[in-house]
Image (cartoon, rainbow, N blue to C red):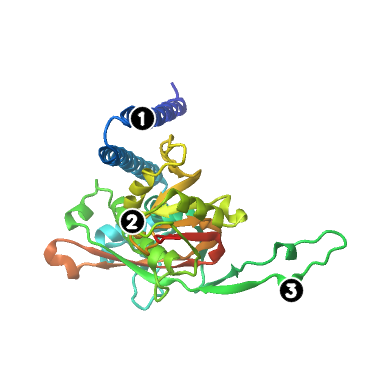
Amino acid sequence: MEVLEVKELVEKVKSELARETKEDVEKIIKLIHDERQKYEDALKGRISDSDFKEFQEKSHAAELEIKKKIDELELRLKEMVIANAQKENKGNMSPERKAFVSWVRKGEKHLQPEELKVMRVSEDVTGGYVTPLEFDNRIIELMKVYSPIREIAEVFPISGAGVEIPKESAVDMDAFAAWPGETLLAQDLKFAEERFTPFELQALVTPKRTLIEDAAFDIEGYIQRKVAEIYSYKEGRAFVVGDGVHKPEGLLSANISSVNSGDASKITADGLFKVVYNVPTPYAREAAWLLNRLTILEVRLLKDQEGRYLWQPALQAGEPSTLLGYPVYESPDMPTVASNAYPIIFGNFRAGYKIVDRVGMSVQRLVEKYATEGKIGFLFWKRVDGGVTVPEAFRKLKIAAS
């Protein structure tokens, strides 16, 4: 059998295994959900309301824990796909990337003249080297895996110091178009320009010297994963609660209208319905929910007037669960449920929130600073900004009585 035929056969088998695994996970999730609902229906009325509520909370918490494990498995599978892609591309490494990996392992003094020639010195006053484009792209791919906001917002890569993006305001839609005999009111098209100037964000990774010097250890992939995790954690928080001072403006810091939950201390089904129908139709079509894990647990216990759960768990691995027909994304930086808090945001994130990335990262290799610990430090810095450009595309749920 030819080498090409063997490769095609292997890829076919891998594809079949992935499909079968995905189908098995879907069946398990649906089975757990259906069996729990059947048991609850049979149990209702046979025990006290307080005992039934306690059972509901425990069963939902158990189901949520199973879903969490499946989500973690999905994350690991995504990381494996990226890792495999990295291994496959190692034989096709660019000269810049090869030189960069050599610099990571051995430092500048041990590079060959042809390697030094392709290393780009950073223009930043702190010095260091510019990371290869391939290296950057893989970090960005991993950040999408770790960061919910990056997955659902619109991302603008730029090469300059900043960029101006139109900030839409609510206007009469009749101003945008006209039939014969009607007047096109061009003066009513109101757009303000918002300036995005990416801020510097640093990330420090300190692997053991023994790992760096081990030729069999994938030090490049390790550093990429750690940098992506650190950046995602730090910028992810800013995208939610940042005040816009030396960091991005967060969703909760923007002038977004709110809807009361209908109760001074908890979320209500009526409150969620009001949030959905308070968002203008053009933005509601591709809207989504953003909330933290504890709030998800509270929402999962809510039912409609027919006794059906508002929450619908994902029946397909890798797909988000839905609430009132809209996808749900989890952010640990969203507030928990409390009086006057805003634990939920609903809206069209792609239309309303922009992330601006300055293309390119820089890195310094710190040998002496961590020598006594048997480590070598790698200090990365990149530039990022973000903010709400269309407040009308969102609504916040406020825990308050009507």
- Residue 271 in the image: state x and y as whole percent: 46, 53
Checking the image for residue 327, the label placed there is none
Q: Is residue 117 visible?
A: no
Q: Residues within 10 Å of mark 3 (few under 14, many from 20)?
A: few
Report the front residue among 157 and 300.
300
The residue indicated by pointer 1 is 41
Q: Which residue is mark 2?
A: 332
Q: Dot 2: what SS? A: loop
Q: Amino acid at mark 2?
A: Pro
Which residue is more in the foreground, 272 or 347? 272
Q: Residue at x 38, y 29 (%)?
A: 34
- Number of the front mark, 1 or 3: 1
Which of pointers 2 and 3 lies earlier in the amino acid sequence?
A: 3
Mark 3 highlights which residue? Answer: 187
Q: Residue at x 30, y 29 (%)?
A: 43
| Residue 329 position within the rendered picture, expressed as x and y whole percent measured from the top left | 42, 50
Q: Earlier in the sequence, mark 1 or mark 2?
A: 1
State the separation of the CA atoms marked 1 and 3: 60 Å
Comparing labels 1 and 2, the label whose residue is closer to the camera: 1
Quadrant including the C terminus:
bottom left
